[in-house]
Image (cartoon, coloured by chain):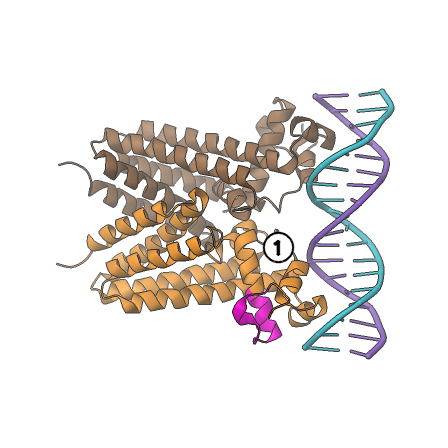
Chain colours: A brown, B orange, C purple, D cyan
DNA sequence: GTCTATACCCCGATAGAC
DNA sequence: GTCTATCGGGGTATAGAC
């Protein structure tokens, strides 16, 4: 039985990991400025002293760790759906289904684990911007590999991978704002069509 | 000569309008939680009393007014480029150029005037979410009209308009994070190609 | 590593004179 | 409509016992 409002699987984790996951989840929903360190320590079941023990750099260091964590989570999901489908078109569709599922399960609250944090600090905190840029680049790289493996020319694949990630980001945002899966589903269909137009006969 | 750090054209404006513009500009860069009412009053050259006189609903009412203002600004830009180009493909390209110009001019700080505010308050403040949803819907409507006028079937045009707005949003975000025009330029080329694939012969 | 207490500051919001 | 003063609370961060 839990006495703190932390997430189900966090009980057996180390303190540091619990803090990182809690920070990631909170900043994903509330952004950087909307998330307080006291709230993090409360919901992670750690004292304020522990938080500053593991993250002496304070809130900025916490945000960077949270973005890296979200980066890894999303990359894992991407790798899984990319590996589970034969064509990149099917993989994009599977990715959309996964994103829709996550949004619905959270009542449209949990979008991209990087966007909210990165957007609220654009230009103000270089470390955070850097971590977000690395995340986006990693995700583009995973899509690029899949497109290239499907026989698409390298230059085309690189540009396409960029647009696939951009479009999924934007459509997830539109879905959150509209509280509807439609923008994501339309984007998935269009991305599949676009990718198909680049495939070798 | 100015003594307050407000924007150039704001000097002759009424107090209310000056407050709205300042709020829109600040929340666009810093988000809802990152923007303080005292900062708004300072940069708008209005006293705190004036701010609460015009916006008794406080910060939430300010945010809604700021989003409506940003909505109108972006819609005006959209109408202008859509009317200035014959084909929807050319219009999308012109739109990308306009977005890139705005990003560069602000050193990649000024992205979509709605996203940052809406994202940081997703689910928490229904009024803000509603205003953001209306903005997105309006922009989709403008693109829809252009696509339909180009002879694209109504159902296709509706879905395409959704993806055009989603992709531009996502690509602008990616461009901010990467501090590079590339994601937006790639997205523009791909959107033109996608639209072209729906046009009647 | 964990905990409590606290310093110092800015937050949103209000009151009431002018 | 404009202005100043202030309230109550929460923000980040630190100090130092255990």
Find out whether residue A134 is within the magenta segment. Answer: no
Residue A38 place in picture, x, y as percent: 70, 39
Find residue A20 and report its image quarter: top right
Can residue B64 be seen? no
Position of residue A21 relative to residue B23, above or below, is above
Task: Please tell me whether mark 1 sits on a helix, a strand or a loop.
Answer: loop
Position of residue B12 relative to residue B44, above or below, is below
Which is nearer the eye, B45 or B117? B45
The residue tagged 1 is B35
Find residue A83 and report its image quarter: top left
Residue A7 place in picture, x, y as percent: 60, 32
Residue A23 in the figure: left or right of residue A88: right
Residue A12 in the figure: left or right of residue B135: right
Residue A41 place in picture, x, y as percent: 68, 34
Q: Residue at x 70, y 68 (%)?
A: B47
Which is nearer the eye, B76 or B145? B76
């Amino acid at each position: 039985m839990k006495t703190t409002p932390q997430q189900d699987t966090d009980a057996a984790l180390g303190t540091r990991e619990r803090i990182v996951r809690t920070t990631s989840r909170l900043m994903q929903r509330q952004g950087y400025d909307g998330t307080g360190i006291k709230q993090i320590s409360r919901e992670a079941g750690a004292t304020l002293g522990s938080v500053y023990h593991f993250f002496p750099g304070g809130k900025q260091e916490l945000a960077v760790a949270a973005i890296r964590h979200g980066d890894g989570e999303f990359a894992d999901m991407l790798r899984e759906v990319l590996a589970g489908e034969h064509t990149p078109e099917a993989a994009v569709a599977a990715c959309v289904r996964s994103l829709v599922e996550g949004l619905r399960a959270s009542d449209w609250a949990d979008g991209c684990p990087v966007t909210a944090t990165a957007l609220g600090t654009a230009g103000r905190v270089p470390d955070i911007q850097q971590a977000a840029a690395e995340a986006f680049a990693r995700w583009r790289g995973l899509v690029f590999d899949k497109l290239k493996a499907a026989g698409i020319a390298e230059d085309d694949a690189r540009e396409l991978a960029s647009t696939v990630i951009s479009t999924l980001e934007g459509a997830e945002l539109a879905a959150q704002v509209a509280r509807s899966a439609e923008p994501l589903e339309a984007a998935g269909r269009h991305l599949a069509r676009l990718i198909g137009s680049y495939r070798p006969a």
